[in-house]
Amino acid sequence: MRFFLLATLIALLGACASSQPHLYSQDLQGCLSQLAMFKQEVNRQKVTDAQVVNLTAFPYLAFDRFSQSQLSRLSSQQDREQWLNYTAQLATQQRQAEYHNLIVNPYDLAALDTCAEKMVKEAKHNEKVWAELRQQTVSIPDSYEPWLRVFGLYPISSQIAQSSIDKEKKRILLGFHTPTKDIVQYQLTETISDSGIAASLHKGGQAHINRELIASWFSDALDASTIHWPQLSKTTISQLYQYYSPLINIETASADDIPGTVNYVDSQHKPTVDTSQPAIYLHHSYTQLYGKIYLQLNYSLWFANRTPTSSFDPYAGKFDGVLLRLTLDHQGRPMLLDSIHHCGCYHMVFNFSDKFVFENAKPDTESPLLFNRPAPFDSPTWSVTLSHGEHMIKQVGWLAKKDLPNANKVQSLVGHHYDQLRQLPSHQQHTISLFDQRGMLAGSERLESTYLWPFGIPSAGAMRQLGHHAIAFIGIRHFDQPRLFEQILRPKTEP
């Protein structure tokens, strides 16, 4: 106990010394110290959540690649408030996860949240805060290790590997032409809220939601933003998750092909995927494409294993998963779909829009697999088919109403928020994150990392947390790069 009190006192002194109290009014100094002390205790107990990053001077904010890319664009008071609301929400989600993951917890979450709200309110009109925000550089962790590329003779390794990468792409493309078999169909039917309450979702019961209503949601959100950033309410985004929920067809050869719920089920603190509870994990994000910001709906599936295809399969191992990301245009219509596995591998991009065409690939950066799939405007339902074992996308398409399957033949997927993975219940008094402080899932390592390290990706093939997905072996590219699509697409020029 004495040690804990001493550590807390040291943390307090350090927090007061390092949080730049001169930026804030006197009545907020206590809040500043309290939030800074909390972050230091989180670091001391090694339960830091790696999905977003923090700056000591702003313990009430958190940052991702997108928020940092927008900071230089903020000119009006309206812009500032929108950006602050976004980064404050990132911090709130991180704080909640870290609070529940603390092993010894002397803090009050409600008090911490209240302090953060007060500081955000002041920051919106505090010029010193904005000057400091613009001056400080937030370092978003790179998912590549340059020293690995140095020792791996990357300039030579990348040239040698190009033929193997091309061969793998051809193999994946062949999968689009092979017949499917033993298909089990899944679709989102209910979501679990933060309070643990299940809400049923049925497309038939959502008849009041249509393209015109969705377009009005986006129009109102864009009118409220000087930089045309469509920030929608949680309720509205939840409705969009359901409206655009894909029909997921999975070739099923074993329990490894059932998308399940991630949890801790034993006293060894090892996570597992419970296939008796089929589930899908949801979150939203934003991207910038040629000056405009677009909303993205993310659907993540988790599988217990990637099934080995032979006695020696370097890609097989515990855990597997697929992330499907649907980008909506400013009318709320599907514009792009792209996908990765949770290791960051197998990036695919499907262009649904007639306004863009694919850019010519640059020789020094690995290109994703590219597909054109024009989206009809008479159906909101898109489908994706995954292969058995390795869970590779085999087909993506759109379903007319007459082609929708009988609801009785579709397995229900419960929708969980992705944030639940940052604080999973355990047999202890506290929760445990699925990911470590590097943003990786321990136990999901692959043998492929023993020969892929020259490309600079630590533990290639292991499952990763959002914000840590390197998606190219040749070149440098992250899944959450704010302007990722500008490297892949260009506006279509009229003849």
Image: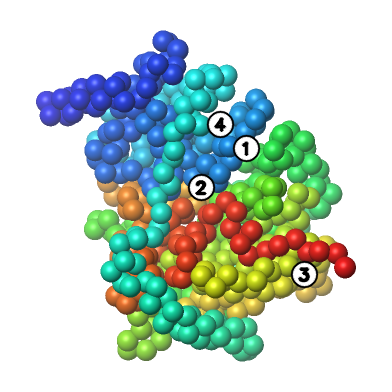
Residue at x-position 67% and y-position 74%: 371
Mark 4 vs mark 2, foreground winner is 2
Q: Residues within 10 Å of mark 2 (few under 14, many from 20)?
A: many
Where's residue 274, x and y in %?
A: 42, 64
Q: Give the colouring mode of the picture.
A: rainbow
Dividing the picture into quadrants, the one containing residue 111 is top left
Where's residue 71, x and y in %?
A: 56, 37
Residue 73: mark = 1
Mark 1 vs mark 2, foreground winner is 1
* Closer to the camera in the image, 415 or 241: 241
Alpha-carbon span between mark 1 and mark 4: 13 Å
User: Which residue appears farthest toward the left when viewing the image?
Assistant: 2
* Above or below, 193 relative to 469: above
> Would you name the residue on which mark 2 appears?
65
Alpha-carbon span between mark 4 and mark 2: 15 Å
Residue at x-position 49% and y-position 52%: 418
Going from the N terminus, do you reach mark 4 or mark 3 first?
A: 4
